[in-house]
Image: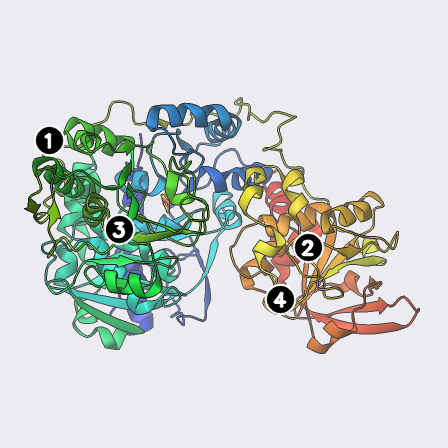
Amino acid sequence: MAFDIDMIKSVYSKIAERVDAAREVTGKPLTLAEKILYSHLWDGKTDKAFVRGKDYVDFAPDRIACQDATAQMALLQFMQAGKKTVAVPTTVHCDHLIQAKQGAAKDLKRANETSNEVFDFLESVSNKYGIGFWKPGAGIIHQVVLENYAFPGGMMIGTDSHTVNAGGLGMVAIGVGGADAVDVMAGMPWELKFPKLIGVKLTGELNGWTASKDVILKVAGILTVKGGTGAIVEYFGPGARNLSATGKGTICNMGAEIGATTSTFGYDESMERFLRATDRSDVADAANEIKEYLTGDDEVYANPEQYFDQVIEINLSELRPHLNGPFTPDLATPVGELGKKAKENDWPLKVDWGLIGSCTNSSYEDLSRAASIAQQAIDKKLKPKSDFGINPGSEQIRFTAERDGLLEVFENLGATIFTNACGPCIGQWDRSDRKGDEKNTIVHSFNRNFSKRADGNPNTHAFVGSPEMVAAIAISGRLDFDPMNDTLLNEDGQEVKLDVPVGLELPPEGFAVDENGYLAPTEDGSSVEVKVASDSERLQLLTPFEPIQDSELKNVKLLIKAFGKCTTDHISMAGPWLRYRGHLDNISNNCLIGAVNAYNKKTNFVKNQLTGEYGGVPDTQREYKAKGIKTIVVGDHNYGEGSSREHAAMEPRFLGVAAVLVKSFARIHETNLKKQGMLALTFANENDYDLIQEDDTFNFVDIENFAPDTPLTIEVTHADGSKDTIKANHTYNDAQITWYREGSALNLIKKQNA
Ligand code: F3S
């Protein structure tokens, strides 16, 4: 059904040789991260040492995982590649589009009604192209991946930032944009800047109220939300071996909150136990045979300062439980010190909700430890002061937790069991006690707690903690409650204290599931029809982009000169627009509406050179498109920074923008523009940005000679007839120029497959 043991064995068969070769070329012992990276080079040639934080390297990931929101455009694009099946094993998981409101059964039914066309599309396209499909309600992508697909020493990419969760089973698993996933699905390499390495040495052992979650809450406090940027965080040491595999998953999951490329742990007995418990003894057996290649070299861990770019040490025996927040996951406060901080900052002490679950913390161990606290509330006659909501991570977890009576414990406290899906973690939460302007506090075991993340309300103060701590705080109803020292008054008026949580790493009777929600693709999908209604407003099949002809670049109009910061959010806004992420025409109505027009400092208000009138950017651009006139977007520094969403490149391309000329690019966006067959250019002389005027027309005089390492010349004609000639640099190599000439990278792949 799920994992592909032959693929895993094939990866393992190459590891030893490649790792040994990598040790040779680098002249040093290797970290686990390096072993995985060097054994997944695209060309398989381990003959060069890469410079961390500098070299861009092509990799060959083993797997791809996509969630339902980001999969839509990724798969619509993949369909353009002309392939019969995906080139590497891929799965799609329906978890983001299910709103939490009344409880699992009703919520799932509603989601199946409101998003059925998206689910139908994803199911049919998966079936056609050999992609495993996990139905709505089957579970949250990262928990399902951990239970079914993750394997020690593997490399995976996924169209979700918390793909990194699979580091809990010793993978290098990285969240990417849809465009990257499409490349790999289509058989192309995946490029990554060779990451820096941060080592976290764990000593001691968790005890009492402290959980795996507290390790990453502490690390987030140390490194902050940017501290891990461009780096892989590798955990090691005796403390690491004492953590469960799912606990390791929690730690890796929240590595996304410190900006890390990913996080990972070396293969150990906890991983072996988890693999065997999830019916993958053959993976465990295969891993055991090459154990030493699935963890960092002894010498690295003995002298970490010598081999990592940064080293942090945490003694788990001394670690205290934390609650991080509000509004940022790196504001770490040990439980017990939060009351003072809350009073100083005027954060509401009353807690309205305790939410347990999400991809971060919904393992059997998590639920059993939290349930042990919930059971105490019943036994000690404590009536919870907050509402409880539970999101199990998968149907397998839910079924097993129900069988073992864990869910009943929560239900006895009045908890709502939501669907096995993201729900409140991604703002898919129709909160029953909807709060308006009033400040309010919630605690949850999720990963992100930015403003509005859970319920869309900027007045909600969300704090992140372990599931057991969330349970305790929710029972007390107070943010300043410290279960290690404080007592609570029960229904008989007695003061009672909560005992430390107890839990089970794995279900003693094993995991069980009735219907796990997985649909395997058909053997031969050639006759499967992809379901997209022609009148759908959420989905639209793509039409290949036509190559931009040199002749079209003689009378190019300025669409907008963007002033200051122009991120991918400014280019393709999120929020309500995400509803249209599978419909390029409809979502293009948000194209550049957040960019500030340099001439009037307004957003979405640009001059239409054909009429002299001012209007919105998409409307104006559509008028140029209707007349067959190509346009150019001019921008400032780091244009296109932010998320890697491919819509930010596809929308301007779809609407007829031919070129983007800026002082500098955010690299991923620059590559995305190239992939869509556009010109991504930078001013050879930055000051030329100031020459560009509102009524300018551009003539790409030497586009016929577009070649690597050769700047392009652009003649700019101003309204008064005067002209300036400017030079535009670019970073296109030969292959990328072919993408441009063919109209897009996918057009080229299609041609090669024809
Ligand atoms: Fe879903 Fe939240 Fe994880 S949105 S994938 S549960 S981070």
Tags 3 and 4 touching, CB below 8 Å: no
Tags 4 and 1 touching, CB below 8 Å: no
How far apart are the two marked residues, 2 and 3, measured between alpha carbons?
40 Å
Q: Which mark is residue 392?
A: none
- Extreme residue toward the right, this view: 721
Q: Residue at x 9, y 42 (%)?
A: 493
Residue 54 image position (x, y, % from top left): 45, 71
Q: Which mark is residue 509?
A: 1
How far apart are the two marked residues, 3 and 4, measured between alpha carbons?
39 Å
Q: Which of pointers 1 and 2 indicates the residue nearer the eye?
A: 1
Can you see residue 203?
Answer: yes
Q: Which residue is mark 2?
A: 678
Tags 4 and 2 touching, CB below 8 Å: no
Q: Which of pointers 1 and 3 indicates the residue nearer the eye?
A: 3
Q: Amino acid at mark 2?
A: Met
Q: Amino acid at mark 3?
A: Thr
